[in-house]
Amino acid sequence: MNDRAALDLLLAHGPLSRTRIGKLTGLSKPTASQLLARLEAAGLVVATGTTEGRPGPNAQLYAVNARAAYAGGLDVNPRRILAAVADITGTTVGEFELPTPGRRSDSVVRQVTDALEGAVKAAGLAVADVRRVVIGTPGAFDPSTGRLRYASHLPGWHSTTLLDELAAALPMPVEYENDVNLAAVAEQRLGVARGDEDFVLLWNEDGLGAALFIGGRLHRGFTGGAGEVGFLPVPGTPLVRQVVRANSGGFQELAGAQSVPRLAKSLGIDTPETPYAEVAAGLLTRAAAGHEQDDRLAELLRLYAQRLATGLASVTAVLDPELIVLAGGVTAAGGEPLRALVQAELAELAASRPRLLIGEVQHRPVLRGALESALATTRDEVFDTAR
C-alpha cells in the first residue's frame, strides 16, 4: 500500500524528494528510503536531478520511470482513425492519423493494426512494448452479442466476428468503449469533472450523445446504449420512428449539429456549404463573439440554448446530476455565452439545478480518454506485479 501510494504521488506531483514523499505519505525517513530503494530496484522509479534554490544540501529527486510500461488508445470515426501511445506517466510519445474514407468495409482489422503500428513507430517502440489498448468508437458493442450498435454510419464495424478478429490480430489485451464515454473519462481524470461522482457529459459534434457517471462509475446500460440521448423524443420536433434505421431521433434533430445551419438560415444568416458540424461550430463561434452587436446572432444563440436545455431537462429529471459538462466541437464553440444561456433556460425547465461547465479537455478528448482508460489498468497491472 505504501509503494502504491508513493507511485500515485509521483504521478500526481512529478519528481519528489525522499523527505517530501515521507511527509506526504506519513512515513519515516528510513521507511521512505527503503520504499524508494525497492521501487528503484523494480524499475518503477528513477533518480532524476536534485532540488535547487533551497537552504541546505540539495536533495535527490525521484520520479516514476516513464519507460516502465506503455499503453495505446484509438479514436475511430467514419473519416479517420487517430492512434496514440503514452508512457506510464501519461505523456503521449507517439501519434498517427489514418484516413479511412472510401476504404473497403472488410479492412477494419487492417485499419486498426496500421493505425496502431503508425503510432508505435512514431514513438520509436515495437508493438510488443504496448501492454494494453483501448479503442473508442461511436455506439457501443453489445456485451451479449459482440455486435456494434447505435453506429450504422461506421462501415465495416458491425460484424459479429470483428472482436475475435481484432483479438487475434493484436498481441495485447484490447478494450472497447463508446467515444463519448471516453471524452467523459478525460474530463473526470483531467478536466472540469475532477472530484465529481455524478455528472453528465453532453457531446455534440457529428452526433449528439451523452456519457453518464453515476456514483463515480460509467453507466453503460444493458446493451451499452445508455447516453444515446440523440434518440430522445423531445418537444419542438416531429416524432422520429425507427430511430436506429434513421440513425437519428428527436433531440438530434432539434439540437444536433445539423440543426444550427437550419436555424441560422431561418434567421437570415448566410451559411457556407461545408460539412454541417464545421458550419455549426463556425456559426456558434460567431454568435458567441458577436451576439451583443448583432440581433440575429443573439437570437441564434438564444434559440439554440433553448433547444439544448429542452433535452437536458429530461436528462436532469431522470438522473439529477450534480454537474453537466458541455463538450464536443459544436457546443464548445458557443463558449461561455452559450453555457450561461443554457444554464438559465434549464433553471426554468428542470426541478433540480445542476452546474453547467464547458469541458476543459479540448484537444482530442476521445483519444485522451482512451489513453487514460488504458493507462489506469496498465498501472494497476505493472505496480501490482512489481510489488
Image (tube, rainbow, N blue to C red):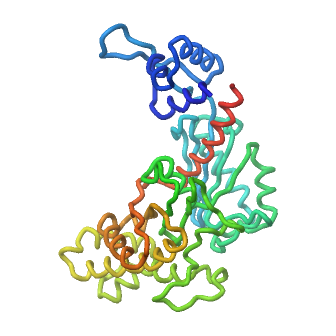
State left or right for residue 174 relative to residue 207.
Answer: right
Give the side of residue 306 with respect to residue 296, left or right: right
Examine the image and state in which quarter residue 259 appears: bottom left
Nearer the observer, 192 or 139 = 192
Residue lying furthest bottom: 238
Residue 15: % across, % down: 46, 25
Relative to 199, is 263 on the left or the right? left
Instruction: Choose top left, top right, bottom left or bottom right for residue 140.
Output: bottom right
Task: Say which residue appears at 46% left-offset and 61% top-offset.
Answer: 322
Above/below status of 72 relative to 385? below
**Which residue is found at the position 44% from the left and 21% from the top?**
20
The x, y position of residue 295, in whole percent, is 22, 81
Q: Nearer the viewer, residue 178 or 269?
A: 178
Instruction: Please state which of residues 156 and 257 is positioned toward the viewer in this rendering.
Output: 257
Rendered position, 383 above or below 374: above
Q: Is 269 located above or below residue 39 in the figure?
A: below
Q: Residue furthest front?
A: 351
Residue 105 appears in view = no
Identify which residue, 139 or 376, lies in the foreground: 376
Q: Position of residue 191 (x, y in %)?
A: 44, 50
Residue at the extreme left: 293
Q: In this rendering, does residue 188 appear at all?
A: yes
Which residue extends farthest top?
A: 57
Residue at 66%, 47% (x, y): give it.
133
> What quarter of the picture does the C terminus occupy?
top right
Q: Quadrant of the N terminus?
A: top right
**Number of callouts in the render?**
0
Give percent across and percent down for residue 27: 52, 19
